[in-house]
Amino acid sequence: MIPALEALSRLREGNLRFVSDEEEPSMLTSQAARHQLTYGQEPFAIIFGCSDSRVPVEIVFDQGLGDLFVIRVAGNVVARSQIGSVEFAAHQFGTRLVVVLGHSKCGAVTATLEELERPERSRSPNLRSIVDRIRPAVEDLRGTDLRDDPGALLEHAVRANIRASANQLRHGSQILEELIAKDGLLVVGAEYSLETGHVDFFDGVPAGAS
Ligand SMILES: [Zn+2]
């Protein structure tokens, strides 16, 4: 089992390689690795990210086959099936780091802010279920000075949504709560910058690990 903080360092190092265009020629996607992995997997991190095509998780962390257990859904919103996926990986593979990975200029968060401004009646119920999960995390921000600065409002809303999802994973499941309390599971929130490629782990990282 790879401890959470070691997993976090691996992700940071991989993201640095990605940002500096120094990705390792991936032996991790080789045929040999593929064969090896038919016998089992031990992903060192669970990444719960947004579906946005510009944030492909293995690429931005420079990781290969078998390294990451990835769940992606628009707006990185937490529903029961996602909590179940995290429980599965944490339990089955002993993975001890969970990263909620949002990103700048997230379309789902933007759509939620627009919805708060002008409710959209024609939205499909399925799409609405995404917006409804983001809304509680961001609606209070509109009561602040950010209201007058759409760019800053979106930046804060993206981070608020990441924090909310991380908290839902920390407290939305008895199994995960117990793994956190007794077994070294760590849930952190991070934001990927579309502009720089850099991932900022800003939520839930223990002091001294940054
Ligand atoms: Zn997004």
Image (cartoon, rainbow, N blue to C red):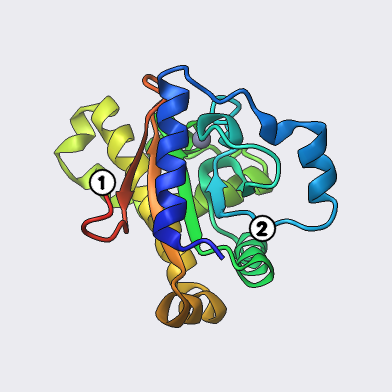
Q: Residue 81: in sight, yes or no?
A: yes
Label 2 CB-ligand 1 distance < 8 A: no
Residue 180: x and y in percent read 44, 74
The numbered mark at residue 153 is none
The numbered mark at residue 42 is 2
| Residue 112, picture quadrant | top left
Residue 178: x and y in percent read 48, 82
Residue 200: x and y in percent read 33, 39
Judge left or right: residue 170 versus residue 89: left
Q: Amino acid at mark 2?
A: Glu
Q: Nearer the viewer, mark 1 or mark 2?
A: 2
Q: How many marks?
A: 2
Judge left or right: residue 140 versus residue 86: left
- Which sits in the foreground, 180 or 27? 27
Q: Residue at x 21, y 59 (%)?
A: 207
* Number of other residues with Cα within 10 Å of mark 1, as a class: few under 14, some 14 to 19, many 20 or more: some
Residue corresponding to mark 1 = 141
Q: Residue at x 55, y 40 (%)?
A: 50
Q: Amino acid at mark 1?
A: Leu
Vertical side of 10 occupied by 95: above or below: below
Residue 29: x and y in percent read 72, 32
